Image (cartoon, rainbow, N blue to C red):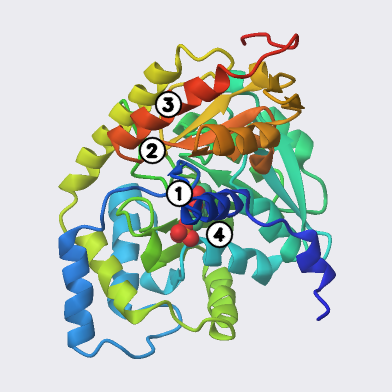
Amino acid sequence: MHISGRLRAARVSGTVRLSQLARALAASGRPVIDLAEGESDFDTPAHVVEAAHAAARAGQTRYTDVAGTAALRAAIAARFRRDHGMAVEASQVVVGNGGKQLIFNALMATLEPGDEVIVPAPFWVSYYDIAGLCGGVPVVVPCDAARGWKLGADALAAAITPRSRWLILNSPGNPTGAVYSAGELRALAEVLRAHPGVAVLSDDIYESIRFDGTPFATMAAVAPDLADRVLTVNGVSKAYAMTGWRIGYAAGPQDLIDAMVKLQGQQTTNASSVGQAAALAALTGPQDFVAAWCAAYARRRDQVAAALAGVPGLRAGRPPGAFYHFLDCQGLIGLQAPGDTTMASDTDLSAFLLEHAGVALVPGSAFGAPGHLRLCFAKSEDALARACAQLAAAVSRLGGPARTDG
Ligand SMILES: Cc1ncc(COP(=O)(O)O)c(C=O)c1O
């Protein structure tokens, strides 16, 4: 079968690939600790599962409006108004099969061939390939660890061209956990005011996962004068441990939302009716467990950082949000594994660690930042302790003249 050039040019998602490798190893009888996949080990709260059950029993088993049920769209709009003071009506909300579908549809609905999408790096793997699949050109703007992995106004201004159509922001960010302050967003907004053709896709999927009192800010709230070109994407996957339910949502200018709904109507129609009932329960029900989960993630973040502190060549930071360590492994690049295989890249290293430590981590190059490994710490303390011990043992088997112990 002929496979389109567009698809052939896309990469398989680095996180999905690693998780598949980990599952294949596990299926062959080798125990693997999967810290590659970006999802929490907590279960979807019981009241959410119960709401889905009740909805199915009550006959909510048919197509819904393409854009989502009226109740869910109203609840989402109310939340945007309450939490961030955003002027969002229910008609400006579209519910889809995960945030990923909404990002895809936003770009598919708006990009002409060759239009540019500004993607600050490190970036979530899918932005790059979705932009390409939709006929756009991802323009990667590297951001420094020393500047908290965040895009500065100067770098944004330098990246904008007459073909720029979107800037993608993700805070708290995957893979680095970086969180933009309101001031930092205001500085970016100031640049954008001079470029009315550039829209902002604000991916807030990790909004509720923040540590150490780090405040949350989002572009549509910080710069309401730009709201007619800001699409805010969010969902229940990360906040409520609901990755399998596939419910995400987006709010933005009416013409864009209408276009996304039109596209979704020719694609998947609505998101699952039962999933939407579950999402409604998650968004409107008790929220106290969210803080308790964040406290657990913060403890696990610190547990991993402490356990890896003694591993030469692997450095963990203190991310303020999301649930990933973006480990600096540059000190291990160039070393040799027993049998003389050289760790020429983070990809080699991640393959070595999967094989010899039994731990799946995603190479930073998948996120546009070679020399790093992403470790998801939303896993049990026991799994994290074993993973760190196994990583330390495997790393100690690397040697050679290139070792810098960085
Ligand atoms: C930054 C970011 N955005 C969006 C998504 C998509 O999440 P979902 O499609 O499950 O809503 C993910 C999932 O890993 C993510 O990390």
The residue labelled by disc 4 is 228
Q: Residues within 10 Å of mark 3 (few under 14, many from 20)?
A: many
Q: Position of residue 72 (x, y in %)?
A: 31, 72
Instruction: Note whether residue 25 is visible.
Output: yes
Give the mark toward the camera: 4 or 3.
3
Tell me: residue 339, above or below residue 131. Answer: above
Tell which of 304 and 76 is nearer to you: 304
Label 4: state its secondary structure.
Answer: helix
Label 2: state its secondary structure.
Answer: loop
Give the mark toward the camera: 3 or 1.
3
Q: Position of residue 135 (x, y in %)?
A: 78, 65
Kindly report the distance in space between the C-alpha atoms of the residues bearing marks 3 and 1.
29 Å
The numbered disc on residue 204 is 1
Tell which of 326 and 90 is nearer to you: 326
Asked whether the beta carbons under mark 1 and mark 2 sit within 8 Å of each other, the answer is yes
* Quadrant of res 349: top right
Kindly report the distance in space between the C-alpha atoms of the residues bearing marks 1 and 2.
9 Å
Q: Residue at x 54, y 55 (%)?
A: 24
Quarter of the figure with the N terminus: bottom right
Q: Earlier in the sequence, mark 3 or mark 1?
A: 1
The numbered disc on residue 388 is 3
Label 3: state its secondary structure.
Answer: helix
Q: Earlier in the sequence, mark 3 or mark 2?
A: 2
Q: Earlier in the sequence, mark 4 or mark 2?
A: 2
Tell me: residue 341, above or below residue 400. Answer: below
Quarter of the figure with the C terminus: top right
Q: Residue at x 59, y 86 (%)?
A: 266
Q: Amino acid at mark 2?
A: Phe
